[in-house]
Image: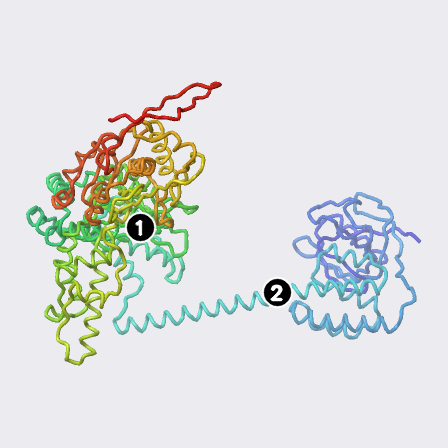
Amino acid sequence: MKQLYPVLPIRDIVVFPHIVVPLLVGREKSINALEEVMKGDKQILLATQRDDSIDDPSEDDLYSVGTLCNVLQMLKLPNGTVKVLVEGVRRMQVSNYSREKKYLRAYAEDLEEVSAEIDGKEIDAITRVIVEQFEQYSRLNKRVPEEVLSAIRQISEPSKLADTVAQHLVIKNEDKQTLLETLSPLARLEIIHGYMENEMDVLKVESKIRSRVKRQMEKSQREYYLNEQMKAIQRELGEQDDEHNEVKDFENKINALKLTTEAKDKALSELKKLRQMSPMAAEATVVRNYLEWICALPWRKRSRISRDLARAQKILDEEHYGLDKVKERIMEFLAVQLRAKKMKGSILCLVGPPGVGKTSLGKSIAHATGRQFVRMALGGVRDESEIRGHRRTYIGSLPGKIIHGMKKAGTVNPFFLLDEVDKLGGDWRGDPASALLEVLDPEQNHAFNDHYMEVDYDLSEVMFVTTANTMNMASPLLDRMEIIRIPGYTEDEKVEIAQRHLIPKQYKANNVAAKEWQIDEAAIRDIIRYYSRESGVRALEREISSLMRKAVLEITKSKGKVKAVKVNSDNLQDYLGVRKFRYGLAETEDAVGMVTGLAWTQFGGELLTIESVLIPGKGKVTKTGKLGDVMQESIQAAENFVKSRAAHFGIMRESFEDTDIHVHVPEGATPKDGPSAGIAMMVSMVSILTNVPVRKDIAMTGEITLRGNVLPIGGLKEKLLAALRGKIGTVLIPHENEKDLVEIPDNVKQGLKIIPVKNADEVLAHALTQKLIPVKWQDKIIAGKAEPKSSEKRVEH
């Protein structure tokens, strides 16, 4: 039966039957309702608000199921609020509200619990589980009083047990309201079981977190305590001053250094941060490292530059044999730099094959000028931060290689060698070649900004020199450098280098006396010819080192019987084994379709054999030998030129109609490309089509055009060296390359007969063993087609 009850809206709590709960009441209408019930039967209806933030709730803001409570005690406090103690009696269903000015009232009726027949064993089981589970929960949640746990152990009624446990669970009010509205005791116990399982999982995780945090705090406190003890002991022993002295040391260093205004302001700013930080703070280590870098860099310290050009020339001559043109250019560069007193000129780039002495030449320049030598290897560098450094936001960040090199040099004007600049790569981490643009630009490098240092650093007094094997570099980077080519060495130069530098160096490296091991000049030449085909001298040095090691082993194993080892041409193979290379790839006899060309590689010049054969077919030209696109186009140009001048060369028309030509360049595993073998291809085709042999002692290089002109090529010195090494007697070169002969060593020009040629007729006149006799083609037109006569008359040319 519905009755009218005063209503007390409550926030942030749900009151269950059988539970005594203290409440603080501050709203005027709620106080009026309490005062009214204290005059009568002291019963009031508690309804929980849906939204705790509403001060004056309406009927829609309250849940429809509440709890009828007895007011046990009411106490007015000095601040105007009322403290009240209520005891839940039973669940009530609110049907409608009666809003009055003083307080809220509602019509409500009792909610009877569902009393379906339930197995007593099931009730006992679930009751026992809930009690045990709540005990575990109370151990994890220290806010559950011990008396509540004792009271729960005494409860045997399922409904009262469920309400009591629900009241003390730390769950959301929505979940508690769901339990209040659930009328079946068994269902309430099952829901509570699920809530407690989830809550205990959360409490276990919280417990683990608290334990871990506590252990970390204990560890940090212990480390701090021990560090303080250690510092105190060290101070007593006079080994360490306190943190104030460290800051003072930094301040003295910063004031003593002649920093730029920007760098000094930045350093003092970081020092101020360090002074305000705890010594144990992680950020303090970062700031300390930064200040150490600031203080370690050279800001004004300079090396005394040697201005004695005669001494510089002497050092270059002593440490490097040959390379006269290269040394002359370096001396010009040094002379200008000494007069200008400022490094505003272009950056030198030494380009040449491996082993010709680019890096050692850089060391000699540093030695000659009196600068500190710093080498920075760029091979395989793919990250821009390797050049510019990492920003200090990253853990373990450091400055880039440029700043590292300046710290290592200790002066603001060192010699900085950027080795293998053509091996720079780029990927998603950035392009280091682009980062080098600022470094190598004399107009910009006075304000180089490293990401770690965050201040401008002056690199304008640094002498930068780069090295590379090829000119395969970014165009902007190439534009900032002056290229000095270092070609390969001649055989005579290699012999001198071995006798002057390599053998004395290996004497010292292997601890061998000069009287214990000797090698004659003929054996050195054999090593150069048969064991070390290269432009430089690295392989030559390895073979000499191998000979010396074998000599040391022989002397040691003989136990004094062998006093010295002498190496000559006769016993060289006993030490180095069978010959690795053929010296002189020139043909031993004149051959049809066989031509010796000249090729350039990054390791120097090479002889290139070109072969052609005729096979039955339909006039097709087959090209093999792993040829690149440019070389294949060069063969096609040579083919069409030969076809266009076939009658002039004495080639019968049938040769193009019923035969195929196969052009092959041996060593098929080696990629080949470039147009400079054009005239060699043309000579090979003419030779095989006319059956006229090619001279065995001649080699050639040059690009052929469709009109038969010979165009210039590159790498002339390396190609001529290869011809000399291969015992070629005559070399045909493009007429426009005749001007480059001034740079060719005299011994090369004396050992070769070099003939400049302008066109294909001159090439064929020198290359073939016989003079070509032209033929006259007489055609007749049949049904629109040209048809040759059976008799074609040869005409003397």
Residue 45: x %, y % from top left: 82, 54
Dots 1 and 2: beta carbons under 8 Å? Answer: no
Quarter of the figure with residue 126: bottom right
Mark 2 lies on residue: 205
Q: Secondary structure at mark 2?
A: helix
Residue 184: x %, y % from top left: 86, 62
Q: Is residue 318 above or below residue 652?
A: below
Name which residue lies at 71% across and 46% down: 55
Q: Amino acid at mark 2?
A: Val
Q: Nearer the viewer, residue 642 or 385?
A: 642
Q: Nearer the viewer, residue 778 or 98?
A: 778
Q: Is residue 704 above or below residue 447?
A: above
Q: Amino acid at mark 1?
A: Leu
Horizontal relation, residue 610 to residue 83: left or right: left
N-terminal of the two: label 1 or label 2? Answer: 2
Quarter of the figure with residue 516: bottom left
The quarter of the image holding the C terminus is top left
The quarter of the image holding the N terminus is bottom right
